[in-house]
Image: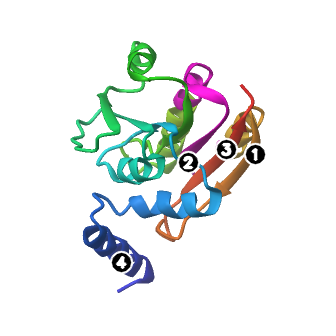
Amino acid sequence: MRLSEAKRDHYRKLAKEEGYSSRASYKLIQIQTKYRMLRPNNCVIDFGCAPGGWLEVASKEVGDGRVIGIDKKPVKTQLENVKILTIDVFDSDAESKILAILPRKADVVLSDLAPNISGVWEVDHAKQIDLCRRVIEFLPRILTRGGSILLKVFEGPHLKEFVNQVGKSFGYVNIAKPPASRTASSELYMVCKNYLG
């Protein structure tokens, strides 16, 4: 068994043992351990929340706070501090629907959005950056000043320009690759803190 396969199996087994719906939970857990983005009583938006692994982690971290999960796939949850909004982020009324369910501006925005993979790397990378840009478009209305975002990105030619663009709106930006990510995967995570508004 290759190392990446062994790691994938390890986190899948761990998720089952610890009651998480997805091995992806450990990516957020590892990022949270290092960067401490999520805090008690936070309001959090989780874009691309299906199947729910990040929702479960965020729910535990915020306690009496609120988590809004957003995905175009229906997601079921019994977590009391989590609400689900089933929409496509590119819908024309997406922002108004988010604002209608958001109790106040979010302290943290998470995005694990990913395109349907075509196998043509240049196309997939460009689509991924487009998803990230869409989330960034929402920030002035949904993220509080001083807040944080975590974005999944793919390595590729558009990434540096995107990082530089987003960096102008935050006091701190870093690229992370948590151990739970497959070694061979091109996915990275942008950690952005202290939103300047």
Q: Residue at x 48, y 41 (%)?
A: 111
Q: Nearer the viewer, residue 109 or 144?
A: 144
- Counting from the top left corner in percent of width and height, residue 197 is at 71, 25
CB atoms of marks 1 and 3 within 8 Å: yes
- The residue that disc 1 covers is 172
Q: CA distance from mark 2 to mark 4?
A: 28 Å
Give left or right: position of 15 versus 129. Answer: left
Q: Residue at x 32, y 76 (%)?
A: 9
Asked whether residue 156 appears in the rendered view, the answer is no
Q: Nearer the viewer, residue 11 or 55?
A: 55
Q: Nearer the viewer, residue 186 or 176?
A: 176
Q: Which residues are magenta?
A: 134-158
Looking at the rendering, which quadrant does residue 138 occupy? top right
- The residue that disc 2 covers is 39
- Counting from the top left corner in percent of width and height, residue 25 is at 40, 59
Q: Earlier in the sequence, mark 2 or mark 4?
A: 4
Q: CA distance from mark 2 to mark 1?
A: 18 Å
Give left or right: position of 1 versus 181. Answer: left
Q: What amino acid is labelled 3 in the image?
A: Cys
- Counting from the top left corner in percent of width and height, residue 139 is at 59, 26
- Counting from the top left corner in percent of width and height, residue 146 is at 70, 34
CB atoms of marks 3 and 4 within 8 Å: no
Q: Nearer the viewer, residue 131 or 64?
A: 64
Q: Earlier in the sequence, mark 3 or mark 4?
A: 4
Q: CA distance from mark 3 to mark 2?
A: 15 Å
- The residue that disc 3 covers is 192
Q: CA distance from mark 1 to mark 3?
A: 6 Å
Q: Earlier in the sequence, mark 3 or mark 2?
A: 2
- The residue that disc 4 covers is 10
